[in-house]
Image (cartoon, coloured by chain):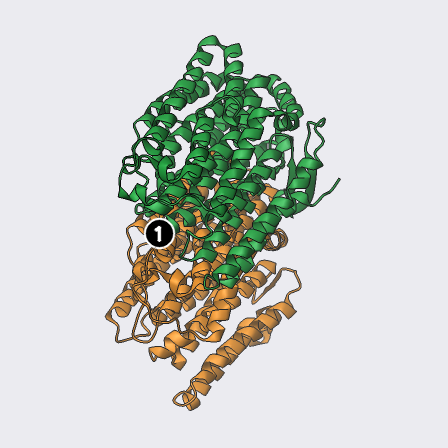
Chain colours: A orange, B green
Amino acid sequence: MLNNFVVPDLYPAAPEIFLLLMSFLVLFVDLIFGATRRWMAAMLTVITLIGCAAITLVTSDGQTTLTFSNMFVDDLLSDFLKLMTYLAVIMMLIYSRQYMADRGLDKGEFYVLVLYATMGMMVMISAANFLTMYLGLELMSLSLYGLVAIDRDSTRGTEAAMKYFVLGALASGLLLYGMSMIYGATGTLEIGGVAQVLYEGQAERPVLVFGLVFLLAGVAFKLGLVPFHMWIPDVYHGAPTAVTMFIGSAPKLAAFAMALRLLVYALLGLAADWQKMLLIMAVLSIGLGNLAAIAQTNIKRMLAYSAISHMGYMVLGLMSGVVGGQVDAFTAVNAYSSSLYYTVAYVLMSLGAFGMVLLLSRAGYEAENLDDFKGLNKRSPWFAAMMLIIMFSMAGIPFFIGFFAKFAVLLAAIKAGYTAVAVVAVMFSLVGAFFYLRVVKLMYFDNPVDSAPITAGLDFRVLLSLNGLAVAAFGLFPDAVMMICTTTLTRSL
Amino acid sequence: MNSQLLSLAIWVPILGAVPVFWIGSERRTLVRWLSLAVAVAGFLVTLPLYSGFDVTQAGMQFVEQAPWITRFNVQYLLGVDGISMPFILLNSLVTVLVVLAGWEVIEDKQAQYMGAFLIMSGLMNGIFSALDGVLFYVFFEASLIPMYIIIGAWGGPNRVYAAFKFFLYTLLGSLLMLVALIWLFLESNGSFNILDWHQLRIGIAPQILIFIAFLVSFAVKVPMWPVHTWLPDAHVEAPTGGSVVLAAIALKLGAYGFVRFSLPIVPDASHQLAPFIIALSLIGVIYIGFVALVQTDMKKLIAYSSISHMGFVTLGFFIFNQIGVEGALVQMISHGFVSAAMFLCVGVMYDRMHSRMIADYGGVVNTMPKFAALFVFFAMANSGLPATSGFVGEFMVILGAIKFNFWVGFAAATTLILGAAYTLWMVKRVVFGEVANDHVAKLTDIGGRELLILGLLAVCVLAMGLYPFPFTEVMHASVDNLLKHVAVSKL
């Protein structure tokens, strides 16, 4: 055996390898300096991510390269999503620094878990084999379970972690079961191989569809689509806000990659089947997410339901790639890139929204109720304006990025003939507008109940301002990001 | 001919709002003067639109074109014709008046108040000049944000309810329009250019669906009966400036949408559904006229009077003849002046008495003679007295309606009675008679600033009533072209 062993091409996986090595260093540094110089681990984590970004950029050649016996792929899509992931994680780290320090949670474990979760996402993004996908997913999920419970004295956090773990394990089981069915039908676990067998039409359809249902359940769980959304409100609510921000941002990119790799790259031949399932889940998510958000008084729960509805909108694009069983490259790229654009836009808005929640929190005080936003315009007009931008963007009002994201997926859906679905989707965004407007109302029309000055570091303020302005600027000039998404998918599909 | 005038009209107020916000409300004098300077600059840059306008040309003028979202072939495409150009001037002028009207009255967060109106002004210029479907939609919807804040932050006791109702009602309509716009984009093989859509051939069934989608959107905005209920709430709760902008400009957006979108893009559906729209308009004119009669709140009364007057506008559009359409456009501009003036008048009284109830007033003429003269004049214009602008538009629409069908014209003409009844009865109770109470007795007459605002509007109303030619002249060619276009079936 050994003499057949060929060292695989490590080059495409360079960012992952670098991150792994650096995570050891972070652990080591934390062991030695953890008690006295906590900032070192934080600094090192950010440096690691910046290093990863540099490596990804340098090694990106726009080609699709498979390595590790076709288990791992490096293409433009993976490069783009990884860069976005690094960015989201770095932003999260800067946002959460003070919050975690105030609560004594900025331990080495936090940074190491964040790094491993990031690595899990990177593996998911680059998966070219069902097993790689599963490996990445588990690495990410297990790290996230740990992160949710990082404040071990918080009963709410522990409870949330437990729920997340049990439901997540169930979803992983479903996913694995679906994968095994598809393996049974096609005889391969390779994403490209499955697509090939489906294309040749040799596999048994009932088994495939049976497997698809389970596979889709796993994907829907990660995206948080109704009816697999139960964990989202509780986990968002129970986790420390910084961790909620983490869960609500970068993993959405990885989940998008997972959906795209499994459904489009592997199972495009079954598009007619999974599109119908996605359609139902999308409409339910948009409906339930928007309706349930109205009833919330806790902003983290509200944003959780809003996340459910946003993922529903995102799926509108995903299900519009194949029209009438005909695979047309232009339509497909158009639809999938609209979903990619939506995901990127959502991550940006989500980071900003949770950034605002962190801004209002301080040592010993969790600003997680909607009423904490009361009269923010009197306390800080600038940050009230930032929140206004983010809320209107989430509601899909122009000139903000959220509008163009909705516009792109609606266009894809109508093009695929789902006009009625598009009408339903926009009607529910009217419902959704209500609770985003309520936040604006609290900030601008009400008097403050809390007059504590806003104490946040300069880095935090600058980042939050940039985040809010980016939501506005990418709305005024949406072309660049849209083009990047389209080019990425054109060259990776 | 690539001029930058329209871009200036849009972006001067919007970018001008940035330093206004920046200065902050602490330095009030600076904020006021800067806001005024921005508003005046915004008005001055629109003047060349009138002076440089070629009245013989029916097409778009001052066209600007640049790619915006290449991914979907969305363009930054601006241009005006005789129909839209007057509204840009009107809007920019009203903004100056609104800034002046909020000079002393607004004490809380004045910088934000002024900034919101400046942004609003720029966005509305954008709506009137956008020739790209997405660009239009983006301006149309973005203009909700400042108005929502204006009503909610500086409004009356029930402002939150009114602000939400205003926002959600309007959003309901525009979201359906978005679907229609996307459908048109796909049908026209990837163009968002409104002028391309004018040439697009569409079957009757989709035409009717598109017409309905546009109708919901624009009818809410106009507002037409029965989707008008947001307007009285919004008007009553909004600060004076908000009411003025709503009545003078925002309501015109819906009517403008009919002329720019519904009529030329789906002419067959427009013809088929015209009886329906005419019926709704007449209900608006007559029924809402009666509703106005029983109001006890002056602002509410003027709000209902606005709905009734706007019913005239939609009526004028859907009888499809030159005099009707032109009359409707004149009526829109005239109503812009008159309703702005009426709301400002109520604002003047409200600032002193903090009441809008008719019953709290009486004999105002004894203590505020100058004001009373102007108020009576505007009331006359509101009820359509000859020699005021209110008469010209109404008369033209009635003429057109009688040409179309005698009984439609007859029903429309009842407004001359109803309008006079509710307006003059209110004036009688508020202005004339004995001094009603001590509060009225202590009233002080209007100062120079208020006189300037109202005087300016009075001049406009009178000029338009005596010599409407400069207004009709610019719209003539465009209306002619529109009607020729609408007469041709697109099936």
In the picture, residue B311 is in which quadrant? top left
The residue sitting at the right extreme is B1
Q: Is residue B170 above or below residue A253?
A: above
Q: Give the side of residue A298 with respect to residue A42, left or right.
A: left
Q: Residue furthest top?
A: B406
**Residue B55 visible in the snapshot:** yes
Between B403 and A275, which is closer to the camera in this rendering?
Answer: B403
Whether B207 is drawn above or below A71: the answer is: above
Q: Which residue is mark 1?
A: A438
Identify residue type, mark 1: Arg
Where is the N terminus of chain A found, in terms of image quarters? bottom right
Task: Describe the element under mark 1 as helix, strand or loop.
Answer: helix
Residue drawn at x 27%, y 35% as measured from the top left: B359
Q: Nearer the viewer, residue B362 or B398?
A: B362
Between residue B143 and residue B98, name the one nearer to us.
B98
Locate residue B157, reporting x and y percent: 30, 47
Q: Position of residue A156 (x, y in %)?
A: 25, 67
Q: Dot 1 surroundings within 10 Å: few (below 14), some, or many (20 or more)?
A: some
Q: Is residue B82 shown above or below B37?
A: above
- Report whether residue A312 is seen: no
Q: Chain of mark 1?
A: A
Q: How far across and how far down the image is residue A168, in percent?
A: 34, 61
